[in-house]
Image (spheres, coloured by chain):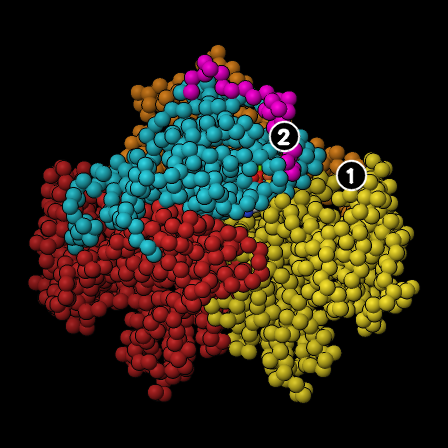
Chain colours: A yellow, B red, C orange, D cyan
Amino acid sequence: MNDSIATPSAEGGVPRVSKISEAVIRIAGNSQDGIQAIGGFLARLAGRSEQEVMTFMTIPSTISGGPSIFQVRVGSGEVLSAGDEADVLLAFYQHSYEEHIGALKKGGIVLYDTDHVEPKAELKPTYHHVGVPISSLTIEAIGGTAKDKGKNIFALGLVARMFDLNTPKLEALIGERFGGKDPSILQNALAAFHAGYNHSLGDVVETFRFVDSQRKDGRQVVMNGNEAMAYGLIAAGVRFGAAYPITPWSDVMEILRRELPKYGGTFVQCEDEIAAISMTNGASFAGRVAVTGSSGPGISLKMEALGWAVMAEVPLVVVNVQRGGPSTGLPTQVEQSDLNLAVFGSHGDAPRVVLAPSGVQDCFYTAIEAVNIARKYNVPVFILSDQAIATRIEAFIEPKLEQVCQDITPDFSPVADYKPYDLSTPDGVVPRVVPGTRILSGKYPIAGGLEHDEAGHPTGSPELHMQMTAKRRKKLQALAATLPAPKVYGPPEGNVLLVGWGSTQGPIREAVDRARAAGDSVSALHIRYLHPLPPGLENIFSGFNHIRVVEMNDEGLYGYGQLGGLLRARYCDSRIRGINKTDGLTWKVKEILEHARADIAAGKGKK
Amino acid sequence: MNDSIATPSAEGGVPRVSKISEAVIRIAGNSQDGIQAIGGFLARLAGRSEQEVMTFMTIPSTISGGPSIFQVRVGSGEVLSAGDEADVLLAFYQHSYEEHIGALKKGGIVLYDTDHVEPKAELKPTYHHVGVPISSLTIEAIGGTAKDKGKNIFALGLVARMFDLNTPKLEALIGERFGGKDPSILQNALAAFHAGYNHSLGDVVETFRFVDSQRKDGRQVVMNGNEAMAYGLIAAGVRFGAAYPITPWSDVMEILRRELPKYGGTFVQCEDEIAAISMTNGASFAGRVAVTGSSGPGISLKMEALGWAVMAEVPLVVVNVQRGGPSTGLPTQVEQSDLNLAVFGSHGDAPRVVLAPSGVQDCFYTAIEAVNIARKYNVPVFILSDQAIATRIEAFIEPKLEQVCQDITPDFSPVADYKPYDLSTPDGVVPRVVPGTRILSGKYPIAGGLEHDEAGHPTGSPELHMQMTAKRRKKLQALAATLPAPKVYGPPEGNVLLVGWGSTQGPIREAVDRARAAGDSVSALHIRYLHPLPPGLENIFSGFNHIRVVEMNDEGLYGYGQLGGLLRARYCDSRIRGINKTDGLTWKVKEILEHARADIAAGKGKK
Amino acid sequence: MTASPTATTPAPAAPAAPAAPAAPPSATDRKPLSKKEIAADHPTWCPGCGDFSVLALYFKMIEKRKLWQEKFTTISGIGCSSRFPYFVQAYGAHYIHGRSLAFASGISLSRPDLHVFVFGGDGDLFSIGGNHFTHTARKNIKLTCVAMDNWVYGLTKKQTSPTSPLGYKSKTDIWGAVDYPINPMKQAIAAGASFVARTTSSNPNHVLQMMEAAMDHDGFSFIECLSECVEFYEGAFDGANPRKGGVFNTVPAEHDVTDEAAAYKLADAAFPGYFGVFYRKPKATKNAKEAALQQQATAKFKGLKDWQILQKTFDAMK
Amino acid sequence: MTASPTATTPAPAAPAAPAAPAAPPSATDRKPLSKKEIAADHPTWCPGCGDFSVLALYFKMIEKRKLWQEKFTTISGIGCSSRFPYFVQAYGAHYIHGRSLAFASGISLSRPDLHVFVFGGDGDLFSIGGNHFTHTARKNIKLTCVAMDNWVYGLTKKQTSPTSPLGYKSKTDIWGAVDYPINPMKQAIAAGASFVARTTSSNPNHVLQMMEAAMDHDGFSFIECLSECVEFYEGAFDGANPRKGGVFNTVPAEHDVTDEAAAYKLADAAFPGYFGVFYRKPKATKNAKEAALQQQATAKFKGLKDWQILQKTFDAMK
Ligand SMILES: Cc1ncc(C[n+]2csc(CCOP(=O)(O)OP(=O)(O)O)c2C)c(N)n1
Ligand SMILES: Cc1ncc(C[n+]2csc(CCOP(=O)(O)OP(=O)(O)O)c2C)c(N)n1
Ligand code: SF4
Ligand code: SF4
Ligand SMILES: [Mg+2]
Ligand SMILES: [Mg+2]
């Protein structure tokens, strides 16, 4: 929250109302308690209130469920990360209370279920404790049976009161969620909500009201990264996909499986990941860019077939929702350790494109861009998302669908002649002619994995292999030439440059803001195009004393991470050093600053 | 050959005999003609004569066979490569004559089959032509039926006469090869040989005799790289392996399948490459390091399972006999484009060891070293061989088998207690206790792909994932600390340093010799341990003005090859630049010097 | 590119056929493709290889059935037999080893207007490709798959294949194969293939018959075609070749091709076994089922553009 | 490490068992493992999951048959069911998804002294792992494979599995599954498995019976064990559970377990079908065949050390 809030005093009385610009609320319970629903409601409310919002959640790795949290950060200004510290902690159980009170900022409010939580005396002075018999009051309100369902909604009511949230909007959201065949379900939900809302918060010394946020041009949509990815692919015109389930990729495929038929498309659940990429290679070969995806282990399995698409020059989009590795690793935690695999993971010289979205909204637009790069250059394109983006909810300005949605149906008009691997084009790019098209010369193309001549027929010719290898490389070099040089966040020159990619953009920018607020010279560079790299990075680097690449992967044998390695190899700039971690959690702003402290200190005073 | 030989004059007469120290003979025909057999005989004769020998061959990529060559270079001194130019060309057909006479050095001798070859008048001045009706004389000698078999042996006789080779030794070799059930086969072979040997070489103005080569300590064995690899694995104590056929890897598996039973071992042909590495993971888990292998496409398929071995810390040896890529690529040609895959090819941070033998002899010793590294550090080890090493024949001093052969049977003595992923060891290395061993504490280990605690049980703990990731990394850092810094070939300081790995060692060293003979300052560095890299390379680099990494792979998006990228990333030394090609052929000495010429010239005069 | 009067671009979301081109000019005004027009590179197979006749009969079928190049694709994996597409002057793909059926399924499910023919070897389809075979068959994806079974790995020069009989001496079993061979016919039947037939390249008329029947089957159609590898397994199929003293037994007249158990029994017969259609029982294809799902789904959005359908979804996410 | 009187290190090249440890102390002086000794982590399965009973019966068998930890390994792939090894206090491996049988084969073929038990789900063994299942079965590699079939993907939270019946509503088929399910029993029989049985976790005694019979079978033994996923497919197997109004039909007494065609017919019965041993016909295992090859080969080099054998080979390469 903003500083306007004073550390609550112990005495009771009518709560004072203070205006705030943002709040971080952490809800801690078990995955079964529907705490994600509470967070979801708060996030969507924020979206409808034109506020910025970002959420963060943990999922128990065992199927039978277990402790889980959902953190939502709502702000009237820009919200870059889910927040390091919570202003309010809602604790359903003793373990929730004990494990998460540390995440509450000093003087913050802990709202706990007195039916399950025994507060610790030694903590009372530090945090403002508000006990509510949430379980029993819920039972009172809606009867025992629905208890487990109702408790979260009751708590939502408490929060709504505390933050003076827009109840009509919340009721509408509850209605949309629970309004179904059985009306009693909705009644129960609303009853629980009102019971919570109307429950006196007792000795809470104040409640809060968000300052109005500056008008957004256009309404916001609220969704998580996997949803944004799936709908982005649909907007891009993708109508065929195939995959095999794996966490956290699965919901992208589940959405596409459910939605594509509405557009006359199909998504196939295959017997394994190799079959999946093979089916999409086949569908792409047949005319229209298709999509496959997976996470860690499934991506490793696709590497041989991906190389075929590189060799045959068939467009393809492969989504990798990264999780903790190696091997089965940490299936429900986040990591950025598949970059090397994406860039180097097939045998032979097999150049492919690698993009990484920076957040939920960017998933939508990256999906469209990936499809268009694949189509233009006839090359497979990787999209590196990750578990954090996949599962977090954000509100963003609704895309202008009429403009962004595209039709990528191939043109089947007969052609006079066609050389699929024509070597005469300077950038190596040859528009595709696909099956179903008459070729009047009577000479038809073969797409194959063997090195080939311009017509696609096998050759062992040394010259042709050199030329075709160069052709495949030149396409990416041509793409690179078209890429915009990324813009520096903060001044374009200074002491420390924090470089990042993917989901770390938010915390890195917040770290910059925080450091600059403290008078330190820190800027950030976000790299969205990882392979090929955009031009001009060396000029940006030259403007700083220290270049630190912040990644959620290991520091490696020689002390730098995966993007760090790519940049050092290309620019041979030994000032490029890593800030790495592999704890399966997103970066906390203070962790980043912690790691960069020495470099930052070195720059104190200077420019 | 050495300069002692004068360009032959046209006039006939009794051939003069001149002493030579080495000769390059190229035999050109069709794969069906058994020309490889001729080469094989010459190579083995050289081996028995304590001479150095190196061969080079091409294999038609289509199964129905086709044009093929076998080049053998025999020398009394050190032989580093198969030679750029031939001294003698033996041409069976018109296409052999026309395509390969260019490979003959000016003034060289072309020996051709007048039954099939119509020599070109314009070439006569440049090359010394010797026509022999090889086909018809062979039929004369041994009758029509055996013709196709005999023709190569007849030609062997001609060569034996021309180079005054040791006929008793050759007859012995022929006996060993053809002495079987049917004695007539051997009779025919010897008849063909003598017919060739006794045939007057007509207007050949001279024959040659090799100067005695300096005594070698110990007898030589003659084999190709795939054989050396297979026998090295056997010497290392490997007794279980599994794989799937693919060119050029297949003969390693065929040899192991045939030989292992003699040692109580087994080699399994699996349904695919994933099953193969899984079987070897299982066998290694069960106690004794097992081996799998493949080429390009099959290696890409193994990446997920390889990551399991990294995570579970199970030792494993994976042989990759590289061929041209990407995808199915150039199955019968050579390339070094799987280095990135070997180092970076699995999802997550999955550190593994990568070694590359420099030649046939080194395949034998690298196999043993790979097994021992895998055992000591409980990590998968890649051996990157290639098609050129795999198929070329070399003679080398016979290994002292009694000393090098090792027994790696695990120790099954009961242990008090066991923590498979003990975090307390400084270098992360924990000796394995394998199934079949009693553990008196009653606590038994589980090997798994999920991140785990010290006992091997699953954990989502951020701390443990950080610690275990570091443990897996530290093992390789510990290994690196034990690696010898490679020795520079040529002076340790100078103008140009040619850096290479794998099968390019020979041509690179010969390039150094040739350049130094011409007074240029050129040295070479061969890197055998590719991941982790040995210590001390930066010091070596600092002694040179230009560092050029010579590789048989593409220059990449940014102008350097695969080892080039690894070195640049680690040392951030922009003087590290590539010399790359992807024509599917081994480097010619003059090609390397061609590429390095500018740098070499820049150093003229200077130190 | 020259435009043709008949060419049109289909509606973006034509249900069930996201990318189906317009129908070709009516059959009447076009001659069937001649052998000359449909033949591409000269096959690189060894002289005498059984695969030649399979290719020749494929050409015959294309000519006889008036398949023009824009109406079909020829797909394969890797192997001698899998070189097939290079020899056909039409759209084709030479995919990776073992995965041709998954690749072909992607074509079949996204392009209902194309006939999809898959050719592969015993190793390609039953060793590395075995699982894709099983699942393509069980899902009844519409395409025709011809296994050119030579009981050996040809391209890689004589290793044991999953169909090599016990005792066959290969480079990976110099003492003779020890692993029990797989029975492709049983595999197909057990997996749920809706058309299962067996033929041999030494009987051209029969091969053509089976190919046509397979092409006419609406579903996954499988043909095991014995095709001799003269280089590494000479004489393997003499026993099925009357001209070489063998017997060519066709499926007994009384056999009920809709009786799965009976088909399974037929498949159990010792070599040379029977030739002809073992099993044929049409059932809804995955293609048809997915098309039905599309019709249901699109019906709800009649007349809406794609972006408007997505808009409805977004409206619910506020 | 404390040395044990009975421990010895076997001869380096002990044929057929390159790394086989010495026999354990004679059964007499050791008590069978108690439930307490053999149980490791408390299972993370959902309360009521059918997998609990499979685990309990595995413990029972280990106790009853006096299997000590140094005599067996428990192997799995990935899935809820595949968490199995973590719950057993003995040597085990939690391998990657779908490849457990290949991994287990590596143990079986290199360690004849160990019993190898594989547990996996329907997705693990018949979707991604289908081909390894087929080839492990056809080669008759000695190990026991228990498919804990719950007709759904549990761990990944309710997607259609290859055994999900038509119409099952999953996250990947919200309108109900459209792909024809695979029949694990038919797959096993057609692939050539030498022991094929079916049971259900709701009938503990029967599960134990089948497990023991499988363990005693010298070859590849397969058990399909229905095991309910209470979380995502509640009641799936009530029809096979008399306590829930279902019927538990055992294999008819007159059924000949050596008759492949008859077994295939049994497998064709509609749900709930039959329970018990469908097929059992011992044939030489790959383990035995490879051991025989080793005996032949080693016989030629009696008394020679490994290096001397290699020396002979090198002598021929000069
Ligand atoms: C992933 C992969 N593994 C292995 C190979 C090598 N390979 C090519 S074809 C083939 C098998 C050929 O046998 P088959 O499929 O029966 O075809 P045939 O040559 O007998 O017609 C193999 C193992 C490959 N190209 N790719
Ligand atoms: C290569 C790979 N692909 C996908 C996954 C994700 N995954 C884990 S278990 C599983 C299937 C689980 O179903 P099943 O095998 O039937 O076991 P169950 O959970 O039902 O017992 C999948 C798809 C993975 N871990 N690895
Ligand atoms: S090797 Fe055999 S299968 Fe291949 S082309 Fe030659 S004969 Fe045909
Ligand atoms: S999800 Fe289903 S299979 Fe998995 S543990 Fe729960 S009940 Fe068992
Ligand atoms: Mg074959
Ligand atoms: Mg299941």
Q: Residue at x 41, y 24 (%)?
A: D280
| Mark 1: few/some/many CA within 10 Å (<14, 14-19, 20+) | few
Q: What separation in Å lies between label 1 and label 2 (alpha carbons)?
A: 25 Å
Q: Amino acid at mark 1?
A: Thr
Q: Is residue D136 left or right of residue D174?
A: left
* Residue A387 position within the rendered picture, expressed as x and y whole percent measured from the top left: 64, 55
State yes or no: Cβ of the residue under disc 2 lies below 8 Å from any atom of ligand 4. Answer: no
Q: Is residue B410 above or below residue A5?
A: above
Image quadrant holding the N terminus of chain B, namely bottom left
Q: Residue at x 61, y 28 (%)?
A: D237
For disc 1, the chain is A
* Residue B552 visible in the snapshot: yes
In the image, A231 versus A403, the foreground residue is A231
Q: Is residue D79 magenta?
A: no
Q: Position of residue B476 (x, y in %)?
A: 42, 65
In the image, which disc is placed on residue D236? 2
Q: Depth check: B319 or D129 in front?
A: D129
Residue at left 46%, top 21%? Answer: D263
Q: Nearer the viewer, mark 1 or mark 2?
A: 1
Name the residue beneath numbered marker 1: A145
Q: Which residues are magenta?
A: D230-257
Q: Quadrant of residue A526?
A: bottom right
Instruction: Identify the residue shown where x is 89% and y is 53%.
Output: A198
Q: Neighbour class for label 2 at 10 Å: few (<14), some, many (≥20)?
A: some
